[in-house]
Image (cartoon, rainbow, N blue to C red):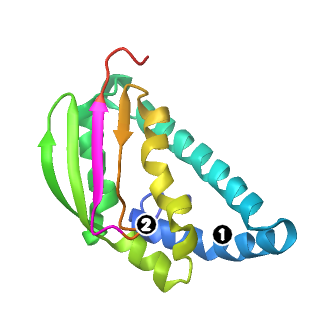
Amino acid sequence: MASQDGKDLPTLTRRRLQAEVIGPIYAEMVAAIGQEKAQSILDAAIRKAAVAEGEQFARRAPGGITSMADFIKLYDLWTTNGALEIEVLEASDSTFDFDVTRCRYAEMYREMGLGHIGHLMSCNRDGTFCQGYDPNIELDRQHTIMAGAPRCTFRYTYRRDAK
């Protein structure tokens, strides 16, 4: 049975449902206040939602204690049903480096005519999620498929002194 909040839906499905609502709202915001301000508002709202989601996941971590190992396990949520195809380069207690070679999130946003804001609705979540989950985890990403690169370069590092 599906939960009332939709949290048991695959993440790609959740992002599609969100985009179906956000897309028309964003278009109205652009018409009313302009693209720059609309993007700024959308960016801030999505980032705040990502931090809150990270905090929720942190509360569910074993014993309430987060770690890089548990963070790595969370990636199953974002890759379910082939949503992301990844090549893991390193996975340890301090590093999680991988490249995304196919991003169905980017494909979906483009198909929906929302490719121009897909980075705001998905990519910007990746680093800010960590702020809520465990501020010791930092993301360095130089390239994304959403921005036209052939692959996304995810480089997560666990910095024990960030808390």
Looking at the magenta stretch, what is its main secondary structure? Answer: strand
Q: Residues within 10 Å of mark 1 (few under 14, many from 20)?
A: some
Could you tell which of marks 1 and 2 lies nearer the N-terminus? 1
Residue 57 belongs to magenta span: no
Q: Check disc 1 and give the amino acid type.
A: Ile
Front residue of 111/140: it is 140
Residue 6 visible? The answer is no
Residue 60 percent across, percent down from the top left = 40, 35
Q: Is residue 12 left or right of residue 84?
A: right
Residue 97 percent across, percent down from the top left = 21, 44
Q: What residue would you read off at disc 1?
A: 22
Describe the element under mark 2 as helix, strand or loop.
loop
Residue drawn 44% across the image and 71% down it:
13
Residue 45 percent across, percent down from the top left = 66, 51
Q: Alpha carbon of mark 1 to alpha carbon of mark 2: how far?
A: 20 Å
Q: Looking at the rendering, in which quadrant would you find the N terminus?
A: bottom left
The segment highlighted magenta reads 149-157
Residue 32 percent across, percent down from the top left = 86, 70
Q: Is residue 39 left or right of residue 56?
A: right
* In this view, 155 is above or below 110: above
Residue drawn 68% across the image and 60% down it:
39
Quarter location, residue 86: bottom left
Q: Check disc 2 and give the amino acid type.
A: Ala
Residue 18 visible? The answer is yes
Disc nearest the viewer among 1 and 2 = 2
Front residue of 140/85: it is 140
Residue drawn 18% across the image and 28% down it:
93
Residue drawn 35% across the image and 51% down it:
142
* In this view, 34 is above or below 43: below
Q: What residue would you read off at disc 2?
A: 147
Describe the element under mark 1 as helix, strand or loop.
helix
